[in-house]
Image (spheres, helix red, strand yellow):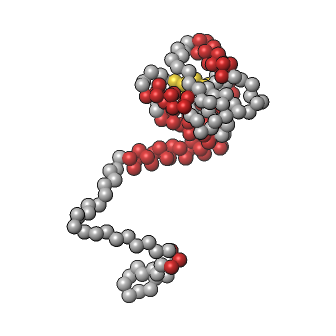
Amino acid sequence: MRESADSSDPRSAFAQQEEIRRHAATHGYTVVAICQDLRGVSANRDGYLALLGVVAAGAVEAVLLPGVATLSSDQIVQEIMIWDLVSRRIRVLSTAETDLALLDGDADPGTTRMLIRDVLSRVGEHARTVGSIPADRPPLRPDTDVMIHLVRADAAEIDLIPGASGA
């Protein structure tokens, strides 16, 4: 949970906590931990980091949010955080009925969110592919020197074939 810096959102941390507890009780869930980020501090994600610790401990199967907007006011950040949790095999739930379409894998969340999800999926796929290939350095003999000469691109003379001028 996270209190909004926007004064138009009146839900306090306590109100969000109670909303989570009521929803969990109604649907037969057990609340294992409640994690909270500080109000209005977008860089402070101590609550989210604590949540990831609970997830890493294998103590949860799902995360129940008091609305997706509590993750962030930015849709991209919301989608990144949801993607992060889902990639850790955690189901993301919300107490807000309006979030059901966003979190249901079969529903259409809209073009912007679909684009963000597609990009995140491709980033994840790329990381899995590249992460499986070892990135070994080429061997350097200890008795050799390596010289790197940096040249500005506009001052460089392109000479792809010795004796031929480059274009």
Q: Quadrant of residue 141?
A: bottom left
Residue 20 horizontal/vertical position (percent)? 62, 18
Q: Nearer the viewer, residue 132 or 52?
A: 52
Task: Judge left or right: residue 96 versus residue 91.
Answer: right
* Whether residue 52 is situated above or below residue 137 in the rendered picture: above
Is residue 101 among what the camera can see? no
| Numbered circles on residues, count | 0
Task: Judge left or right: residue 162 versus residue 54.
Answer: left
* Whether residue 55 is situated above or below residue 109 in the rendered picture: above
Q: Quadrant of residue 38?
A: top right
Residue with the most extreme right position? 8
Residue 1 horizontal/vertical position (percent)? 61, 26
Q: Quadrant of residue 23?
A: top right
* Residue at the image point whose x is 58% and y is 15% from the top: 24
Residue 54 horizontal/vertical position (percent)? 47, 25
Q: Nearer the viewer, residue 136 or 163?
A: 136
* Residue at the image point whose x is 42% and y is 25% from the top: 57
* Residue at the image point whose x is 50% and y is 74% from the top: 152
